């Protein structure tokens, strides 16, 4: 009986050693596989710069006023914040994001500093199917009495943002840990309506002019995103949630295409 117990003890001891050896071998194999690089997305943090109030061009404020009783300042502010919120939401799905409109008192100084250094110029609208940053052309005077003026040769052009150097972007990169900068340069709300017309099938077009930079000042993407909406929509909240949201998604998708090319 004693011999049988010893035999069983030795048998289980040897068997357990065999199992441990096999398990260790399996772990070694797994650790070998784990050394294969995982496909990870590069992390980015985006700073959104809203359009300057003077860069708002609208042909429908009178209709908005008729529905809301808001003055022009409040209409412009609502459009500005509404668009910013939609862009923020789209970026947040994939990346970290901050906007100068998150806290107007906190970011006021940096926002005004940005506006004082940015330069606006009309450029040809880039072909998004094979994007190349617009090349500089001979400029005409485009700002008069504090207002951006569109000339008769402005077809197929958009308002682009430029900097003399990338010092400001580098400063913000250090301060806010952001490496991508989305500038909303101008917003146009144009209408096909004829004054006094009873036509209920007219439409409006919202056009967002934008530029996306990296911290080195390289223009990653720029251009316009336009959406149409019916003349019956006259409340800024509805314009933002139903139509600016589409433009925001298009702009952010273009940005993601540059930042995450492997996902094409």
Image (cartoon, grey):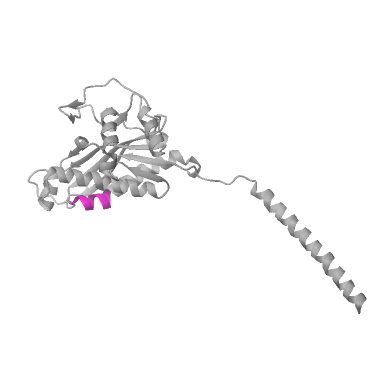
Residue 109, quarter of the rendered image: top left
Q: Residue furthest bottom?
A: 1
Which percent across, then down, holds residue 51? 26, 38
Q: Is residue 230 magenta?
A: no
Which percent across, then down, holds residue 110? 29, 35
Q: Is residue 43 shown above or below 121?
A: below
Residue at the image point whose x is 13% and y is 52% from the top: 68
Residue 177, quarter of the rendered image: top left
Which percent across, then down, holds residue 200? 14, 52
Q: Residue furthest front?
A: 2
Residue at the image point whose x is 27% and y is 52% from the top: 241
Q: Which residues are magenta?
A: 235-243
Q: How many numbered badges does the structure rendering display?
A: 0
- The answer to whether 183 appears left or right of 196 in the picture is right
- The answer to whether 189 appears left or right of 19 in the picture is left
Please tell me which residue lies in front, 54 or 232. Answer: 54
Quarter of the rendering occupied by the N terminus: bottom right
Q: Residue furthest left?
A: 196
Residue at the image point whose x is 89% and y is 72% from the top: 6
- The answer to whether 172 appears left or right of 226 in the picture is right
Which percent across, then down, holds residue 129? 40, 37
Residue at the image point whose x is 27% and y is 47% from the top: 244
Q: Is residue 133 visible?
A: yes
Please tell me which residue lies in front, 44 or 239. Answer: 44
Q: Residue furthest top?
A: 138
- The answer to whether 16 appears left or right of 145 in the picture is right
Q: Is residue 12 shown above or below 147?
A: below
Q: Is residue 157 visible?
A: no
Please tell me which residue lies in front, 47 or 140. Answer: 47
Magenta region, main secondary structure = helix
């Amino acid at each position: 009986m004693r011999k049988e117990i010893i035999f069983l003890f030795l048998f289980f001891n040897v068997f357990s050693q065999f199992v441990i050896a096999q398990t260790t071998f399996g772990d070694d194999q797994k650790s070998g596989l784990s050394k294969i690089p995982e496909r990870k997305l590069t992390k980015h943090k985006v700073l959104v710069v809203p359009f300057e109030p003077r860069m708002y061009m609208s042909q429908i404020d009178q209709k908005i006023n008729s529905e809301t009783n808001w003055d022009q300042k409040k209409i412009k502010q609502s459009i500005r914040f509404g668009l910013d919120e939609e862009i923020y939401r789209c970026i947040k799905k994939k990346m970290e994001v901050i906007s100068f409109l998150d806290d107007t008192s906190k970011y006021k100084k940096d926002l005004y500093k940005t506006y004082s250094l940015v330069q606006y110029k009309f450029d040809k609208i880039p072909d998004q199917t094979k994007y190349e940053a617009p090349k500089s052309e001979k400029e005409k005077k485009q700002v008069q009495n504090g207002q951006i003026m569109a000339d008769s040769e402005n077809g197929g052009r958009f308002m682009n943002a430029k900097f003399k150097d990338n010092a400001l972007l580098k400063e913000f990169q250090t301060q806010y840990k952001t490496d991508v900068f989305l500038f909303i340069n101008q917003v146009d709300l144009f209408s096909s309506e004829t004054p006094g017309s009873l036509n209920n099938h007219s439409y409006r077009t919202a056009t967002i002019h934008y530029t996306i930079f990296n911290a080195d000042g390289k223009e990653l993407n720029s251009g316009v995103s336009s959406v149409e909406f019916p003349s019956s929509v006259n409340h800024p909240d509805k314009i933002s949630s139903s139509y600016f949201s589409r433009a925001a998604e298009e702009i952010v998708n273009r940005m993601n295409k540059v930042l995450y090319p492997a996902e094409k």
